[in-house]
Image (spheres, grey):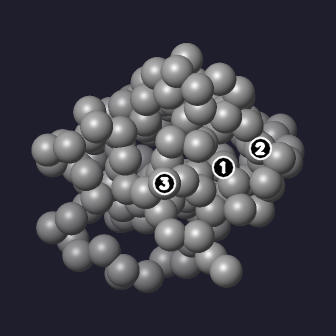
Amino acid sequence: MADSFEGDENLDVLQNIEFCVVAALEEHPDMDDSDAMSAFDVLVKDFRDIERGRTPKTHSLSGAVKSVFLRVRGICLLRMQPQPALDGIQSDWPEVDLIPESALLPPATISRCLKKIRKSMDRWHGVGGRRGYLDFIVRFFPQNS
């Protein structure tokens, strides 16, 4: 997790989201920062639409970008359920009560978390190049063997 995340009241959500990015990286080892950035650009727009009560557009994504998008969108929707603004949005996650109601978050909070991670991507990409962000975050998650 980026050092700017320390003390964030939604650290658990930020970790959940970045875990999804790492899982997509394991599925697509050739993935680079631009794939994650592209997925997050779409996610930020989608959750801004949800925040405004609009249904997000459908997207034609593929490969690593699609994997990041679907995984992150799934965990974000899970952290928001149930929200009336989600009507009509197909979630890849089952409708189950995995998250206590007191931990469910409004769309604005999810949007803020996505924007914070997207900003971190820019920072670490600038420091480490093509895979700077990905190389940075994998250090915080155990690898499957």
Q: Position of residue 139 (x, y in %)?
A: 48, 54
Q: Amino acid at mark 2?
A: Met
Q: Nearer the viewer, residue 49 or 141?
A: 141
**Above or below 12: residue 43:** above
Q: Using a 10 Å C-alpha cutoff, classify the residue at mark 3 as few (fewer than 14 neighbours), some (14 to 19) or many (20 or more).
A: few
- Disc 3, SS: loop
Q: Position of residue 99 (x, y in %)?
A: 31, 74
Of discs 2 and 3, which sits in the foreground? 3
- Disc 1, SS: helix
Q: Which mark is residue 31?
A: 2
Q: Which mark is residue 139?
A: 3
Residue topped by disc 1: 68
Q: Which one is earlier in the sequence, the residue at label 2 or at label 1?
A: 2
Q: Quadrant of the C terminus?
A: bottom right
Q: Amino acid at mark 3?
A: Arg
Q: Nearer the viewer, residue 64 or 127?
A: 127
Q: Position of residue 23 (x, y in %)?
A: 63, 62
Q: Position of residue 81 (x, y in %)?
A: 37, 63
The CA span between labels 1 and 3 is 18 Å
Count the labels in the image: 3
Query: Do labels 2 and 1 touch, CB within 8 Å?
Result: yes
Of discs 1 and 3, which sits in the foreground? 3
Inspect this view and state whether residue 54 appears.
no
